[in-house]
C-alpha cells in the first residue's frame, strides 16, 4: 500500500498540541453566507463553569476518557433548556421539538478540542441522540467544510465566537471495530473493508486531513442483502492542513491502523489498490466540479488565512513538491495555497 514515492514506515507520535486559530475575515463571511455562523443559545465557556467532574466508566467498570459533569443545582434547569434549544437549532433550524430533555453532559479533557458531549433523550419513546460543543477553531472548520464538500458524507455543524456545535457521527471507532469485527455485522468481508480503507486513505491525502489514527475515524457498517458494506468516516478534523510532513496525511502509515493495512496486503493486490485509488480520485473530481461555486470561495478564504506555522507550511510545500515533481509548490506561502495547488495537480 505504498503511496508513490512517499517514504514508508511508522509515523512518530504527534506530541505538540495544535494551537487554536480564530475564525475571522473571509472564512467568517463564508460561514455567515451559508448559515453555519449563527447566534447560539449556549457557549463553550458556559459549559466550562461546572462544579465538578466524575469519571465515566464503561460497561466493564473501567474508566474512559470521559467525565460526567456536575453543575450547581440552581443552574441546571436553565442550562438544560439552552442545550435543548441548541439541539433544535442544529437538527431542526430552531423549530420546537416536544418531549426532549438532557439526559447527560460529559466532558473529555483529552484531545485538542476538549469537547462536551450532550445526550438528548426523547421522553416519548426513549430514543436518544448526541451532539458536541467544542472550542471553535478555523482549521477544524476548514476540515469540516471540506469533508462536507469533497467526501460522500454530509456534515451538520454551526458556530459563533469561540463555540462550535457539531452533530454526532454514527459508527464504531476504528480501533474498537478491529478488536472484534464480527461483533458488528456478522462475517467480516475483508475485501470490502480493505477497499474502503484504500479509498479513505486516498480521500484524506487528497484533501490533506491529518492524524487519521484508528480512534479518529469510525466504521459505519451497512447491511446490503446478504453482505455488508463499510464506510470509514473521519470524526476528528483538527489536523486539517496543519502538520508539515506529507505522510501525516496518509492513514496507511500510522501504527494504529496496521490491522487495516495488513488486511489490504493480504486480500488485494497492489494493482487493485491502485485501481481503487483511481476510482476515488474520479469521485473526488466529480464532487469538486459539483461544489465549485462553494469550494472556490472556501479555498480563497483558506489561502488568505493562517492555520499553521510558516515552518510547517514550508515543509509540506517541499514534501509535496518532491512528490508531484512540481517545483512551483515551493513558492506556496500558506496552507491554503498548498492545498489548492495539491488539488489542482491531483484532480485538475
Image (tube, grey):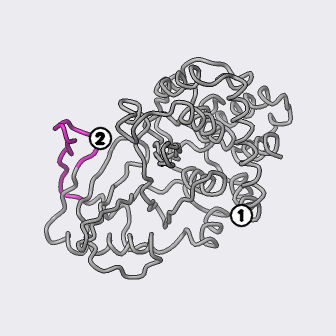
Task: Determine the CA span between mark 1 and mark 2.
Answer: 37 Å
* Few, some or many residues within 10 Å of mark 2 (<14, 14–19, 20+): some
- Which residues, given as a range, are shown in magenta? 50-67
Q: In the image, 95: left or right of 122?
A: right
**SS under mark 2:** strand
State the predominant SS element of the stretch in magenta: strand
Point out residue 247 in the picture as x, y percentages from the top left corner.
Answer: 63, 28
Number of numbered discs overlaid on the protein picture: 2
Question: Mark 2 or mark 1, which is nearer the start of the sequence?
Answer: 2
Point out residue 345 in the picture as x, y percentages from the top left corner.
Answer: 82, 40
Q: Which residue is mark 1?
A: 294
Q: Nearer the viewer, residue 21 or 133?
A: 133
Point out residue 99 in the picture as x, y percentages from the top left corner.
Answer: 26, 77
Query: In terms of image quadrants, where is residue 276?
Result: top right
Q: Is residue 309 visible?
A: yes
Q: Which residue is mark 2?
A: 65
Amino acid at each position: 500500500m505504498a503511496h508513490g514515492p512517499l517514504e514508508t514506515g511508522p509515523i512518530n507520535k504527534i506530541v505538540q498540541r495544535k494551537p487554536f486559530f480564530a475564525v475571522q475575515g473571509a472564512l467568517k463571511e463564508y460561514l455567515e453566507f451559508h448559515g453555519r455562523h449563527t447566534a447560539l443559545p449556549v457557549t463553550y465557556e458556559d459549559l466550562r463553569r461546572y462544579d465538578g467532574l466524575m469519571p465515566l466508566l464503561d460497561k466493564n467498570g473501567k474508566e474512559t476518557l470521559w467525565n460526567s459533569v456536575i453543575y450547581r443545582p440552581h443552574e441546571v434547569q436553565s442550562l438544560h433548556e439552552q442545550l435543548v434549544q441548541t439541539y433544535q437549532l442544529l437538527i431542526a433550524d430552531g423549530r420546537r421539538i416536544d418531549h426532549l430533555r438532557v439526559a447527560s453532559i460529559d466532558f473529555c479533557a483529552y484531545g485538542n478540542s476538549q469537547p462536551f458531549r450532550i445526550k438528548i433523550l426523547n421522553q416519548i419513546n426513549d430514543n436518544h441522540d448526541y451532539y458536541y460543543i467544542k472550542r471553535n477553531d478555523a482549521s477544524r472548520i476548514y476540515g469540516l467544510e471540506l469533508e462536507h464538500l469533497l467526501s460522500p458524507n454530509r456534515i451538520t455543524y454551526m458556530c459563533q465566537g469561540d463555540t462550535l456545535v457539531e452533530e454526532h457521527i454514527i459508527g464504531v471507532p476504528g480501533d474498537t471495530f478491529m478488536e472484534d469485527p464480527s461483533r458488528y455485522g456478522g462475517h467480516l468481508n475483508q475485501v470490502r473493508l480493505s477497499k474502503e480503507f484504500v479509498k479513505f486513505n486516498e480521500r484524506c491525502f487528497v484533501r490533506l486531513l491529518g492524524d487519521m489514527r484508528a480512534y479518529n475515524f469510525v466504521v459505519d457498517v451497512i447491511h446490503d442483502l446478504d453482505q455488508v458494506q463499510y464506510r470509514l468516516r473521519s470524526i476528528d478534523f483538527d489536523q486539517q492542513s496543519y502538520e508539515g510532513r506529507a505522510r501525516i496525511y496518509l492513514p496507511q502509515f500510522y501504527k494504529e491502523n496496521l490491522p487495516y493495512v495488513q488486511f489490504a496486503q493480504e486480500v488485494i493486490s497492489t494493482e487493485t489498490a491502485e485501481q481503487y485509488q483511481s476510482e476515488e480520485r474520479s469521485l473526488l473530481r466529480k464532487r469538486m466540479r459539483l461544489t465549485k461555486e462553494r469550494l472556490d470561495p472556501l479555498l480563497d478564504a483558506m489561502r488568505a488565512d493562517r492555520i499553521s506555522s510558516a515552518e510547517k507550511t514550508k515543509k509540506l510545500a517541499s514534501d509535496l513538491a518532491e512528490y508531484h515533481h512540481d517545483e512551483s509548490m515551493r513558492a506556496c506561502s500558506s496552507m491554503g495555497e498548498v492545498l489548492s495547488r495539491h488539488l489542482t495537480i491531483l484532480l485538475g
